[in-house]
Image (cartoon, rainbow, N blue to C red):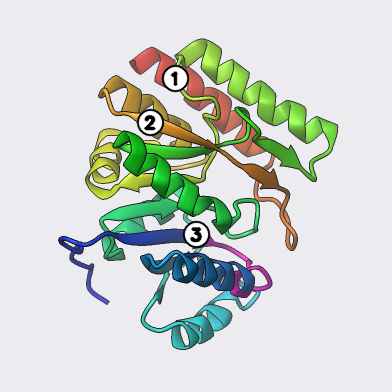
Amino acid sequence: MAPAKPTAGKAVYSVILPTFNERQNLPIITWLLNRTFTEHKLDWELVIVDDGSPDGTQDVAKQLVKVYSPHVQLQTRTGKLGLGTAYVHGLKYAKGNYIIIMDADFSHHPKFIPQMIAKMKEGDYDIVTGTRYAGDGGVYGWDLKRKLTSKGANIFADTVLRPGVSDLTGSFRLYKRPVLERLFESTDARGFTMQMALAVTAKSKGLSVGEVPISFVDRVYGDSKLGGEEIVEYAKGVLQLWWST
């Protein structure tokens, strides 16, 4: 499939959903997205970017493409190429003039999307991010160690970088498409540090960011992709951004 041309005029919301071994989660998150957008009468599409999942995720995705046509498309890649590059790849095929990035494991519930859209309209924000650490946002299903790791990572990055957002590592965001394209061109970070790099770059460019409190729930099926290697990568990324900004 050739890269898509962005939709002109009416608002179309493209959800870019990177997957790796999400066979059990994908049908439910797709159903929830369809229900949310349909109930709020919003034009939408889902771009699934799968990195060669060995568990049959692509077979499930192909069925979803048929069931929810024309709202769902599948873009496949060979091998586990990383979260950040999946967003860049998905954007090439997205038709929407608004882009939503989120996880496929239910940690980001689609019910918050209408609030994020309303927030963007209310303040004409360039970006709206879901936050676990402001208002009535929160984290559920994590043990104390995981909570302390996440909170500590945000405090560390906030102290060093002063990004102006309460949840720097959050990956549930709504972007105006031209803004995301501009940010992708301005940052080389493509791993777990990408969300942080995008927020810091947005601040340096004077872009406006709104926040919506969300309830973050630990994944229902499958294993977390976050390990010690990613934590080290994150720390290095914070210091690199501090040095370059």
Tell me how many marks there are: 3
Q: Is residue 220 above or below residue 71?
A: above
Looking at the image, is mark 3 or mark 1 nearer the viewer?
1
Of 138 and 42, which appears nearest the observer?
Answer: 42
Left or right of 22, for residue 61: left
User: Could you tell me which secondary element the residue under label 3 belongs to?
Assistant: strand
The residue indicated by pointer 3 is: 18
Dot 2: element: strand
C-beta proximity under 8 Å, tags 1 and 2: yes
Residue 185 is a magenta residue:
no
Q: Is residue 58 left or right of residue 209?
A: right
Residue 6 locus on image (x, y percent): 20, 62
In the picture, the quarter occupied by the C terminus is: top left
From the image, tell me which residue sits under label 2: 209
What span is in magenta? 18-27
Earlier in the chain: of badge 1 and badge 2, it is 1
| Amino acid on which disc 1 is placed | Gly
Instruction: Give residue 152's position: percent from left, percent from top.
Output: 68, 22
- Percent position (x, y) of residue 133? 62, 28
**Which numbered disc, 2 or 3, marks the residue that appears first in the sequence?**
3
Front position in the image: 206 or 22: 206
Q: Disc 1 marks which residue?
A: 164
Q: Amino acid at mark 3?
A: Pro
Could you tell me if the residues under marks 2 and 3 are in contact, i.e. CB atoms within 8 Å?
A: no
The kind of residue on which mark 2 rests is Val
